[in-house]
Image (spheres, rainbow, N blue to C red):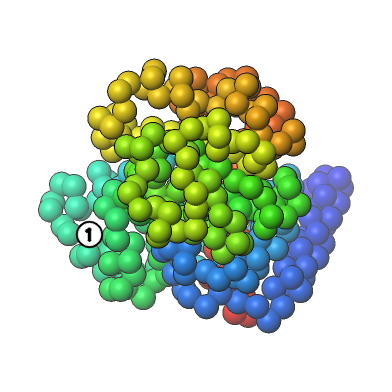
Amino acid sequence: MHPNRKKLQDEMAKWQDDFEKRLTDCIGKRKLRSKNVISIDDLSKEEMDLIFDCTKLFKEFIVKPDRKMGLLKGTSQVNFFFEDSTRTRSSFELAGKHLGIDTINISKGGSSMDKKGETLNDTARTLDKMHADVIILRHSKAGTPQMIADQIKAAVISGGDGWHEHPTQALLDLYTILDKKGKISGNKVVIVGDIKHSRVAGSLIRALNKYDIEPRIAGPPTLIPFGLEKVFKCKVFYSLEEAIKGVDVIYALRIQLERAAGAEIPTVREYSKTYCINPARLAMAKPDAIVMHPGPINREVDLRTEVMDGPQSAVEDQVENGFACRLALLYLLLGGDRR
């Protein structure tokens, strides 16, 4: 072995030992109460703070040249996605592999469900008998992750279910606010767009409430659920210009045409005229406001390109933070807080 290569390996091994000690010290006696993360309500504010503390450390880890560590070697992870996904699926898969977890991917088309008629419950129980430690599940029907979690021993993390929730998206979103603004509480946040069909909004509003933030909700009346203000602590605006004034965070959502949202607006073009975040509307927020979006982005509909690619955009930061946040969550769920 070349001397320089040996030196680099020794340095990395030392860094990894130090990193694991720092993680142990960071966690202390704290731990997650539930083995599942199906709703953001499965986590208290204190547990979310624990995840964010670990996420900060894992952000150091992901920029290292040799990122694979056997922190969770001997555990297994199944990514079971019934809907297309780029960010969530890729980040969970990479997170598992970087932690040393044996990771496999299953889609509906690649399982016995699609060709042979096996039910979702039977498929999940089959996987459970293979002693998977965690299943990441995305499904088009709300409540599916909870139904599966009630029947199996493995931990279940929702990767998004129907119009219901997407809890790990809310975690990475709040961490991005913390990272960019230095704190979560005290920020004024506006969520813009298709609230009715958005599982992202379902988790994000709940998460913001835990930090005593009453988000502003802006969008067409047809895309905002009736009675939203009564169910959650939020304020509803149909005028984006009114809602965006003086905010610290602008969170744009896409129109979910695959969930029939297109039938509830005159046209996508008309929607973009009224609710697209453009430079003029961004200027109504605070000068240091950040712009966020869960992706995928419809440019010129959700965000103007000048905004998306501008200095106030935190969209790419969300992707990086999502990777680090899911590393932290897997580590805590599969042993990091129980050692």
Query: Residue 13, how many percent across, how many down?
Result: 78, 60
Depth check: 210 or 172 in front? Answer: 210
Query: Residue 292, how many percent across, how many down?
Result: 58, 38
Compared to residue 170, the image places residue 277 above or below, namely above
Q: Which residue is mark 1?
A: 120
In screen coordinates, is 114 left or right of 158? left
Depth check: 261 or 158 in front? Answer: 261
Compared to residue 83, the image places residue 302 above or below, namely above
In screen coordinates, is 166 left or right of 319? left
Depth check: 18 or 247 in front? Answer: 247
Query: Residue 280, how many percent across, how many down?
Result: 62, 21
Compared to residue 114, the image places residue 222 above or below, namely above
In this rendering, does residue 95 appear at all? no
Q: Which residue is drawn at the image coordinates 39% and 18% (left, top)? A: 269
Q: Which residue is drawn at the image coordinates 26% and 53% (left, top)? A: 141
In this rendering, does residue 64 appear at all? yes
In screen coordinates, is 315 left or right of 149? right
Q: How many marks?
A: 1
Query: Residue 304, how many percent across, how many down?
Result: 55, 21
Q: Which residue is drawn at the image coordinates 65% and 68% (left, top)? A: 50
Q: Quadrant of the C terminus?
A: bottom right
Depth check: 284 or 317 in front? Answer: 284
Examine the image and state in which quarter residue 330 appears.
bottom right
- How many residues crowd around disc 1 within 10 Å: few (fewer than 14), some, or many (20 or more)? some
